[in-house]
Image: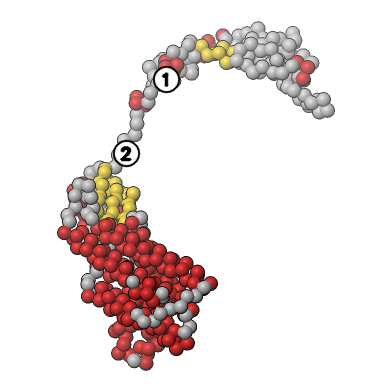
Amino acid sequence: MWCSSTNSIALTAYTYLTIFDLFSLVTCLISYWVMMKKPSPVYSFGFERFEVLAVFASTVLAQLGALFILKESAERFLEQPEIHTGRLLVGTFVALFFNLFTMLSIKNKPFAYVSEAASTSWLQEHVADLSRSICGIIPGLSSIFLPRMNPFVLIDIAGALALCITYMLIEINNYFAVDTASAIAIALMTFGTMYPMSVYSGKVLLQTTPPHVIGQLDKLLREVSTLDGVLEVRNEHFWTLGFGTLAGSVHVRIRRDANEQMVLAHVTNRLYTLVSTLTVQIFKDDWIRPTLSSVPIANNILNLSDHHIIPMPSLKAADNLNPVTSTPAKPSSPPPEFSFNTPGKNVSPVILLNTQTKPYGLGFNHGSAPYNSVLNQGLGIPGIGAAQGFRTGFANVPGRYGTNARGQPRP
């Protein structure tokens, strides 16, 4: 009502901080409710994520309000209305008192933790630089301004200071545009203060590992991997369950002769110093290899015939073959220097006995063929045991090439 009567958008932007304080009170009530609740079968990790969600929602709503103020301020630059200063200064001090009382009188554990754990805002960094200069002149103020001020108290004081400057400039020079400029400044300070807190609480909701504990976790995992009986530590996952509460799960592979309960106790003792909610799964090493009997045998292997027929590859048309080498010849290529007694293009399939090709371990007879049978079939030395012998050992090849009566090769 006071914002409407004064027609000041800067006072409206400062009132949004009061609405944020109301949400912080709701977050404090949720935190007390979480402390009284115990884990249930549905919420096995407890209810600590409710307060994380409350902080995230409060900071995001404050940023949305700041964006709304920026949009209204851009419209007011085109047509600046007249500002009534009757209740402007009174509303500023009432809102400042309410904001400081809410933030300082009540111990709000979630927002206190987030304000310290989140990264500093640009407003805090500029004020920290100014505080170092002031503390260099007056060292007694170092306990108040250093190392960094509370972001909520800082934005409340900065917003009230901007409204006081707006009131003085409007009263002295009727400079109404300064109200819009103050509203933009308050909106930017609100957005810059709430954004790091939204990012931090959002990472907690996404179950990410906090950056400041990654080094400690790596050190503890290396210590666990060197314990007696531990072979491997894998599938480790650690995340922030709530503000200041770390949860995690890990799989530990141990030796077959190691004591599971003893290893579990040592691993839990090492990790419990940092991870309060921990799940450890112990499993022993299994080095048994599958035997041949466990491998399934296809049906077509069992029904093997007595002979294997190996078909010879069929060549192309006879006009593309060289009569000397029985290979495709190019018209422009010179004739080969040497020729071998190779079989021709019409070669019947070679039939080999199945005595040497039966697999082992499947219940079939195996062994080597007698030497005499090999010689009788013409597969041993060329020209022995068959009417026509060749260097390749084929006995059923047409006699295009052979030997004459004197045992010399034909031209």
Residue 286 figure quarter: top left
Q: In this view, does 207 lie to the left or right of 172?
A: left
Q: Is residue 224 left or right of residue 361?
A: left
User: Where's residue 219, x and y in %?
Assistant: 32, 61
Q: What residue type is labelled 2?
A: Trp
| Residue 49 appears in the figure | yes
| Residue 210 appears in the figure | no
The residue tagged 1 is: 298
Q: Are marks 2 and 1 in contact (CB under 8 Å)?
A: no
Compare residues 375 and 293 and report the one nearer the observer.
Answer: 293
The residue that appears at 38% across and 17% down in the rendered structure is 363
Q: Which amino acid does label 1 sit on?
A: Ala
Question: Cα distance, mark 2 to mark 1?
Answer: 27 Å
Compare residues 341 and 359 and report the one nearer the observer.
Answer: 359
Numbered marks: total:
2
The residue tagged 2 is: 287
User: Where's residue 86, x and y in %?
Assistant: 36, 82
- Position of the C terminus by quadrant: top right
User: Where's residue 319, x and y in %?
Assistant: 78, 17
Q: Which label's residue is closer to the chain start, 2 or 1?
A: 2
* Circle 2 crowding by C-alpha within 10 Å: few under 14, some 14–19, many from 20: few
Q: In the rendered image of this protein, does residue 46 appear above or below residue 332?
A: below
The residue that appears at 22% across and 63% down in the rendered structure is 29
Q: In this view, does 259 lie to the left or right of 147?
A: left
Q: What element carries label 1?
A: loop
User: Where's residue 90, x and y in %?
Assistant: 32, 81
The residue that appears at 34% across and 29% down in the rendered structure is 291
Q: In the rendered image of this protein, does residue 49 appear above or below residue 62?
A: above
